[in-house]
Image (tube, grey):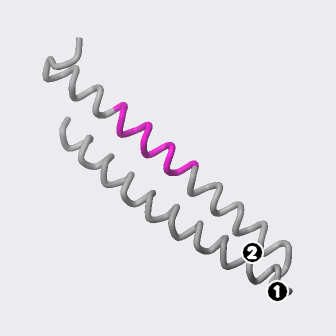
Amino acid sequence: SMQNVDDSYRLIETAKLGCEQAKENLRMMHDRYDSGMCSLTDLLDAQSQWSQSQSNMIEAQTQYKIHETEYLRVVGRLE
């Protein structure tokens, strides 16, 4: 349904925000690590969070395309 398409689009927007936040956190942790202010474990945790945010974005985009395709098929706009 169109509701699924709309919901999926909102999930992409949320995932985008998560990616931006994880990227900024990773940048800050790199700076802190380079300055000796955090451990390698902290840096690796930030990298893991960034990687997970990227996976979440891919999953959200995939779900959007699935719902969009299903909607187009239902309304007869997809052959």
Give the class, few, some or many, for how many residues have Cα within 10 Å of label 1's Cα (few <14, many ≥20).
few
Q: Main secondary structure of the magenta part?
A: helix
The residue singled out by tag 1 in the image is 35
User: Residue 53, located in which quarter of the rendered image?
Assistant: bottom right
Name the residue at 36% across, 31% down: 66
Disc 2 to disc 1, how far (Cα)?
9 Å
How far from the left and from the top, in percent, is residue 51? 65, 55
Which element type, helix, strand or loop, lies under badge 1?
A: loop
Give the class, few, some or many, for how many residues have Cα within 10 Å of label 2's Cα (few <14, many ≥20).
many
Which element type, helix, strand or loop, lies under badge 2?
A: helix
How far from the left and from the top, in percent, is residue 29? 72, 77
How far from the left and from the top, in percent, is residue 21? 53, 70
The residue singled out by tag 2 in the image is 30
The answer to whether 21 is drawn above or below residue 58 in the figure is below
Name the residue at 26% across, 41% down: 5
- The magenta region covers 55-66
User: Residue 44, located in which quarter of the rendered image?
Assistant: bottom right
The quadrant the C terminus occupies is top left
The answer to whether 48 is drawn above or below residue 55 in the figure is below
Circle 1: residue type: Ser
Name the residue at 42% across, 42% down: 61
The quadrant the N terminus occupies is top left
How far from the left and from the top, in percent, is residue 40? 85, 73
Whether tag 2 and tag 1 are in contact, CB under 8 A, the answer is: no
Circle 2: residue type: His
The answer to whether 65 is drawn above or below residue 25 in the figure is above
Residue 76 appears left or right of 29 = left
Q: Earlier in the sequence, mark 2 or mark 1?
A: 2
Name the residue at 51% across, 44% down: 58
Residue 59 appears left or right of 76 = right
- Does the magenta portion include 68? no
